[in-house]
Image: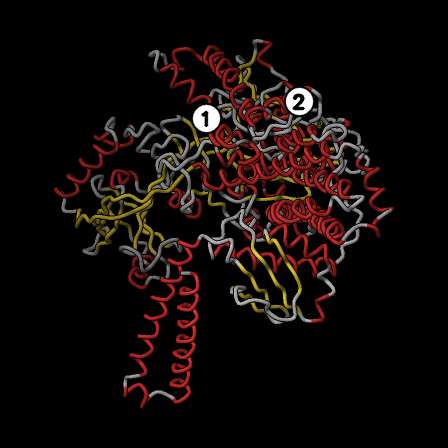
Amino acid sequence: MTTFSKKYEPENFEQEIYKTWENGGYFKPKKTTSNNTFYIPLPPPNVTWVLHLWHALTLTLEDIMIRYHRMIWDETLWLPWTDHAWIATQAKVEKNLLSQKITRQSLWREKFLDEVWKWKDFSHKTITDQVKVIWSSLDWSREKFTLDPDLYKTVTDAFVDLYNKWYIYKWEYMVNYSPALDTVVSDQEVDYKEERGKLYYITYFVSWSDNEIIVATTRPETLLWDEAVAVHPKDKRYKALLKAWKKLILPILNKEIPIIGDEMVEMDFWTWAVKITPAHDPNDFEVWKRHSLSMDNIVIWKDWKMTSKAWIFQGQDFLTARENIVELLKSKWNLLKVEDYNHKVWYCNRSGCKIETIISTQWFVKVEEMTKKVISWYNKKEFEIVPNRFNKIFEDWIFNLRDWCISRQLWWWHRIPRYYHKTTWEMVVSSEDLTKTWEYYQDEDVLDTWFSSALWPFSTLWFDIPSKTWSEDFNKFYPASVLETWHDIIFFWVIRMLLFWYEFTDKTPFKQIYFHWLIKDKHGKKMSKSLWNGIDPLDMVEKYSSDALRLTLSIWNTPWNDLKFDEANVEENKIFLNKIWNASRFVYMSLFEKWDYKLDSIDKIEKRILDNFDDLNFFEKWILSRLSFVSREVNNWMEKLNFSESWILLKEFTKNEFCDYFIEEFKIMSKNSKYSFDIIIYVINHILRLWHPYAPFISEKLWGVLWFEGKLIESNFSRVPFEINKNIEKDKEVIIEIIKWIRNIRAENNVVPSNPIKVELKIKSSKKDLFWNEVLEVISWIVRSEQTQIVSKQSSDKLAYVVTKSWIEIFVDTSNAKDMEWEIERLKLQIDDTKEYIQILDKKLLNESFVRNAPANLVRWEEQKKQEALEKLKKLEEKLSEIS
């Protein structure tokens, strides 16, 4: 006899099962019998990752999809890859070097990159091991890294192809600069924080006039190279100045600058006039483009120091320069006043430093033509967004897409494949590494990380851009079935993939885009390091099991709702898994008690049940009907990607219907049923199949212990051929309601669980046919009744507890089963409560004003309530007297 542990101890088998799966090649695509393929491009974990709950959520949801599609015999691919984590990796290595008092500049580029590769090799194993602990059934034999030679080639090929189509260009533009990282960052890598600052009101005098314009600014240090002052063209206060082409005197420098009309100015905001410094503000930059202003004068450089254009303030940091300029404005009577002011300041969300907006020459992707293709196919519904409320967010991005800045001033990542001849200065864009000839040197900048990520789904399947040839995998799995990801990277990753895939393959990259929810703490707050409310998923796995965490991440989660994560739910799910364990152990032990039972294959058992279905008893037909319903619904919800509805239904069936009712019914009925063992084995087999995508480890373990054929991971998903019998299910609901009512009476009256009660049922004739002897026997067993019988009237006054419904009266005698001391105390408490209630009613009825002024029916109603309370009090006192 194989041992079956009494306790659910996942730490003893989860890792062992994963190794068996991985070493046995169970994660690799298997030849399809459904003529379908299923492929998910995994959002790439960074090599610097430490696993967070939101990563665990992604891995859980995708693994649920993958395991389900494997079990319905789609040829299923889930390909692992890790990303280089450009900024995070470089920053981490720089930090490590600084602890040794070494800077990257002192190492030069090649030696620094050697250090980065060492760090990558070390941290890569950490993240992949974590992903494995968190259960992911990825095909590790196909693992990719974004700097692998074949993926690197795809990136450079893509750049060259777009460059040759005039879709990539280099241009001077206003960008966000992160001084801490020493690189340009995108708008999506910038956070806005509200800070308390100062608002400076500065007087600009009108040239050759006594008039003046007041300008309010938070950055007086940029005043030195204002190119204009803008007012709204329809503002009547300034119409005469605009019409006369008047000039203003720039304070401190005393040079003339124009007054211009631009609708960017809000007529009811601040002083109705805005200073324009194109080199230091993105809004001013747009005004510069519209009005052809000068852009040669940058007063603050990337290091926040004042430049040579800053006159006597050259070399000062901008804060010192601000103080000095303000003092100079005061001395010249140009400073009107200073006020406290709350305003938004830009911060780099990668490094935490303040962002400086600067004019810089960068590489860009022209997106207009590519965007038209995406919009066209989006309107034709070639891909679906789930849930559809994200269509609006998608449209906001795709219809307002600007050219994409793809260059970064880092050392780690794909370098821009542009080369310069060392003697002729010839510029060449090439996918070949021309530095090997020693005649060329390469552009110093690297590509935005999302450039390579946008190519990921087809670069890993191998699609050659120059020749437009592809691999067998590409032909088989492209386009992806589903892209599952966080909705907050809809711009970073999703739209960029759509742009590139339609451009290079003329096909949609994926059929569905599934945006999952955010994880918050149990109070609904966003998890963050600063709030100390983050939870390590590996701690949850160690404490409760991988399966318990998976269930917690997938329950109550639809694509419409955020998840409030509470550790108590993980603990509760471990208790539920223990229930599945105990139910399976019961089946296992029952098989050994039934020494003459031969365990056949599940197909033979299914055929035997089908052939003899008419001979099954009521309870066996009921559980098969419910199993059929649950199996069909779970399949339906899985196809619709609604994992929460599926989870809830499956848990209710397993916990309530199978464990709480059918197992108890089996204990009674099995002695008289020829097919009871077939039924319970068949049902537990399909329960394990249904649970496998959600809880793969416990289901696989129990599958093996119960001697089912092969490995569950490569078995069929649940498909149950039995009829869904609504009449039987309706009749069973009646029986379940009766059992619940009787159980409530036991609980409310503190009946000792092991002590038997007596039950009498007075039933209307239309329902009597349901309650044959076997049903009464099952009810007696479940509610612990020594006698349950059908009566025409109550046979004894001791049957004191009564449940009355439209078609039934239930009389329950607990006189020999109760804890009498507790019952006496309970009755005394009820008597005191009833007396207090009667006093309240008396007070109202003895109030002459109430009786005189209240409606007659209300007075009668209060009198009726008093009479009912008096009758209740009499019965309670009689009952207490009888017990005493």
Label 2: state its secondary structure: helix
Report x, y in % for residue 230: 33, 51
Q: Residues within 10 Å of mark 2 (few under 14, many from 20)?
A: some
N-terminal-most mark, 2 or 1: 2
Quadrant location, the N terminus: top right
2 or 1: mark nearer the eye: 2
The residue that appears at 58% across and 38% down in the rendered structure is: 496
Give the residue at x 61% y 60%.
738
Of the residues shown, which amino acid type is indicated by label 1? Ile
Taking depth in this image into account, of 49 and 114 the one nearest to the observer is 49
Q: Which residue is mark 1?
A: 87
Task: Determine the residue located farthest toward the right in the rendered image.
Answer: 611
Please tell me the numbered disc located at residue 470. Answer: none
The residue identified by callout 2 is 22
Q: Give the residue drawn at x 39%, y 82%.
A: 863
Q: Within 10 Å of the Cα at label 1, are there few (<14), some (14-19), or many (20+) other Cα atoms? A: some
* Residue beneath the point at 25% across and 49% down: 216
Q: Secondary structure at mark 1?
A: helix
Viewer-nearest residue: 502 or 641: 641
Q: Which residue type does callout 2 highlight?
A: Glu
Query: Is residue 208 depicted above or below 505 in this figure?
Result: below
Horizontal arrangement in the rendering, residue 78 relative to residue 493 (left or right): right
Residue 49 can be seen, yes or no? yes
Which x, y percent locates residue 337? 17, 49
Determine whether 170 is above or below 385 in the image. above
Distance in Å between CA atoms under marks 2 and 1: 32 Å
**Left or right of 801, for residue 466:** right
Compared with 748, 600 (above or below) is above
**Residue 120 percent coordinates (x, y):** 51, 18
